[in-house]
Image (spheres, helix red, strand yellow):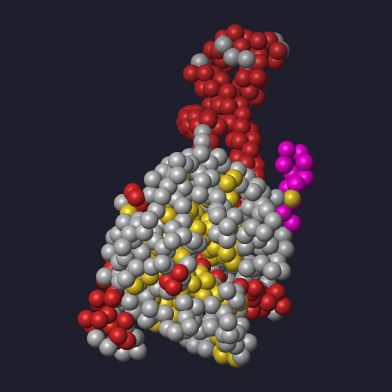
């Protein structure tokens, strides 16, 4: 804490501002204030209740539920008691009314009777009443024979009949019983209630979720190899023409580089899949918000990583019903399909996402349905497309290793895995800044476990593949360079070519720099100016717009020799030495 300011006023009310130091984590500071100061007060309650004759400690919702059930039982027993009393009184009044209607005969019978028992029996026979009613008539005072008293008896009988009908209605309707509970609670509040002097905030327990207090905004999330993570408002990144030098996307230290770069919203879950096959989660708003060129905060402030564990893949989801399955792919080509809801856990230490074999690492995580196709691309340019149906890729539990998705030749490994969509393109980028876009229809469906087919011609001076994405023509792509710069450009700026071509210049890294990461930015609304004074475009570096445009748009070579065996696996073009642009 750097400073405390009392900004209490008549307009704002009581207001205390806590100013944090530059590297402070707001959530950690707030939780410590809750724990060690009077900023938060705890009020204990003995939540013990008798449930089905057994004492039980209940949660608040269970406590209220059982209290309501008990109150309904109280109302039912109370109503049955009142019904019984009303019926007993009405029973007597009906006899009195009969006696008043035959008053002369009743008086004559009583005067002619030698004993009380004889009078009682005579009344029972005369009026067709029972013994209790006859005794009530004999006990009736003479003053009740007056006309006014007769009317009172009649009115009371009518009132009791209405009460009996009301009580029967209450006993027959659970909804009416709940209504009585609400009415009686309102009467208690009206009689004993006063104004609340504190505020109740949802989930305000010192480790609460702040989602309801945070607006949903679009954010660009940046994660470096050194473990620094941040979120930046999306309007800080503007669109550029293909071939741009880029703008600064992160402030890096030493040999640190940006490894993950994607767009999400503040309310999304971020699932952090690590190289050791574990998954952690956090809300996007829990990441520190920083400027475009800031380094952010270390991920250790958010999650309890194990030694030698680092982030391999990050997935953002709205909730765990966003897709039925999650497919994981490893460096050695293993794939595993698991229900997404199996990963819904609050464990701060993370959970096992996949059991890795020796010398293997997690590479990719994708949301899929049973009808989707998957595309796997290797670092040396091989690819395989197969379906994710339960027959081809059966669902497994979290703590399993998966099955073979793709095989590799020597020194090759999996680079990326993505979900194929109709009308989409396979977009690949090399270390040297060359990109190519090919329709997915040129990649035929195969069975998993093969070597696959080539994604394009290979030139060593252009570098290995650093990214492979499934994109739509209207998408935008963000390219991250090792020095931290970011180039953002439209996919449509790269001409659609066949699988046998090499591609065009997409981004031009500085000397001793290279591209390390490619991310899709599908219609996320990152509109902006296409150039600024501090941007250096490819045309400016070349010295003339014509020279730049020519080299960027005509980067095409003669076709290389390629053969495929009966299984559909493409042999590498070992004799290829490059072509002229």
- Residue shown at 64% from the left, 49% from the top: 401
Q: Nearer the viewer, residue 418 or 142?
A: 418
Q: Is residue 339 magenta?
A: no
- Residue shown at 63% from the left, 74% from the top: 301
The N terminus: image quadrant: bottom right
Q: Main secondary structure of the magenta part?
A: strand
Q: What residue span does the magenta drawing correspond to?
A: 46-56
Residue 392 screen position, x and y as percent: 51, 39
Residue 295 screen position, x and y as percent: 53, 82
- Residue shown at 50% from the left, 78% from the top: 482
Report the side of 155 relative to 114 (left or right).
left
Q: Nearer the viewer, residue 194 or 200?
A: 200
Q: Is residue 12 above or below residue 350?
A: below
The C terminus: image quadrant: bottom left
- Residue shown at 34% from the left, 50% from the top: 442
Q: Would residue 63 be visible to someone looking at this image?
A: no
Q: Is residue 395 above or below residue 307?
A: above
Q: Is residue 52 magenta?
A: yes
Q: Is residue 260 above or below residue 62?
A: below
Q: Nearer the viewer, residue 480 or 563?
A: 563
Residue 234 screen position, x and y as percent: 39, 74
Q: How many tags in the picture?
A: 0
């Amino acid at each position: 804490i750097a400073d405390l300011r009392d900004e209490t006023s008549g307009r704002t009310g009581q207001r205390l501002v806590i100013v944090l130091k530059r590297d402070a984590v707001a959530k950690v500071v707030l939780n410590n204030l809750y724990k060690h100061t009077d900023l938060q007060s705890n009020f204990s309650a003995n939540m013990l209740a008798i449930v089905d004759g057994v004492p039980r400690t209940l949660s608040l919702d269970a406590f209220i539920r059982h209290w309501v059930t008990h109150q309904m039982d109280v109302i039912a027993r109370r109503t049955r008691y009142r019904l019984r009393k009303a019926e007993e009184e009405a029973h007597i009044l009906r006899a009195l009314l009969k006696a008043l209607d035959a008053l002369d005969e009743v008086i004559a019978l009583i005067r002619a009777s030698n004993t009380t028992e004889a009078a009682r029996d005579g009344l029972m026979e005369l009026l067709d009443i029972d013994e209790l009613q006859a005794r009530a008539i004999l006990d009736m005072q003479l003053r009740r024979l007056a006309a006014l008293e007769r009317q009172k008896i009649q009115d009371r009988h009518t009132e009791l009949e209405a009460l009996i009908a009301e009580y029967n209605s209450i006993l027959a309707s659970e909804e009416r019983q709940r209504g009585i509970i609400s009415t009686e609670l309102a009467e208690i509040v009206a009689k004993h209630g006063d104004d609340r002097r504190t505020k109740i905030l949802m989930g305000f327990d010192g480790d609460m979720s702040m989602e309801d207090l945070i607006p949903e905004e679009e954010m660009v999330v940046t994660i470096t190899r050194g473990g620094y993570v941040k979120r930046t408002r999306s309007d800080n990144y503007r669109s550029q023409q293909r071939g741009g030098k880029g703008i600064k996307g992160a402030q890096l230290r030493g040999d640190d580089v940006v490894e993950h770069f994607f767009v999400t919203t503040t309310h999304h879950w971020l699932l952090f899949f690590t190289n050791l096959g574990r998954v952690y989660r956090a809300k996007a708003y829990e990441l520190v918000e920083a400027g475009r060129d800031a380094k952010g905060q270390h991920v250790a402030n958010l999650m309890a990583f194990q030694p030698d564990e680092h982030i391999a893949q990050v997935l953002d989801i709205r909730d765990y019903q966003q897709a039925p399955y999650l497919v994981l792919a490893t460096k050695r080509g293993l794939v595993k399909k698991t229900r997404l809801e199996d990963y819904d856990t609050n464990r701060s230490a993370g959970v096992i996402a996949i059991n890795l074999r020796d010398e293997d690492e997690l590479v990719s995580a994708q949301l899929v349905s049973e009808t989707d196709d998957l595309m796997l691309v290797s670092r040396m340019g091989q690819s395989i497309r197969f379906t994710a149906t339960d027959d081809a890729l059966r669902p497994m539990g979290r703590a399993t290793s998966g099955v073979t998705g793709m095989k590799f030749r020597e020194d090759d490994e999996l680079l990326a895995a993505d979900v194929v969509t109709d009308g989409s393109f396979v977009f690949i980028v090399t270390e040297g800044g060359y990109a190519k876009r090919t329709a997915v229809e040129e990649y035929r469906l195969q069975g998993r476990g093969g070597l696959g087919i080539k994604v394009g011609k290979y030139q060593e001076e252009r570098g290995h593949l650093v990214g492979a994405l499934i994109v739509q023509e209207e998408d935008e792509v963000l390219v991250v360079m090792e020095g931290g710069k970011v180039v953002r450009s439209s996919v449509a700026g790269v001409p659609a070519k066949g699988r046998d071509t090499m591609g065009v210049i997409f981004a031009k890294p500085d000397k001793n720099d290279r591209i390390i990461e490619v991310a899709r930015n599908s219609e996320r609304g990152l509109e902006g100016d296409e150039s600024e004074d501090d941007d250096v475009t490819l045309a400016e570096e070349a010295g003339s717009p014509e020279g730049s445009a020519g080299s960027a748009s005509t980067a095409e070579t003669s076709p290389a020799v390629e053969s495929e065996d009966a299984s559909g696996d493409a042999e590498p073009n070992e004799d290829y030495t490059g072509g002229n642009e």
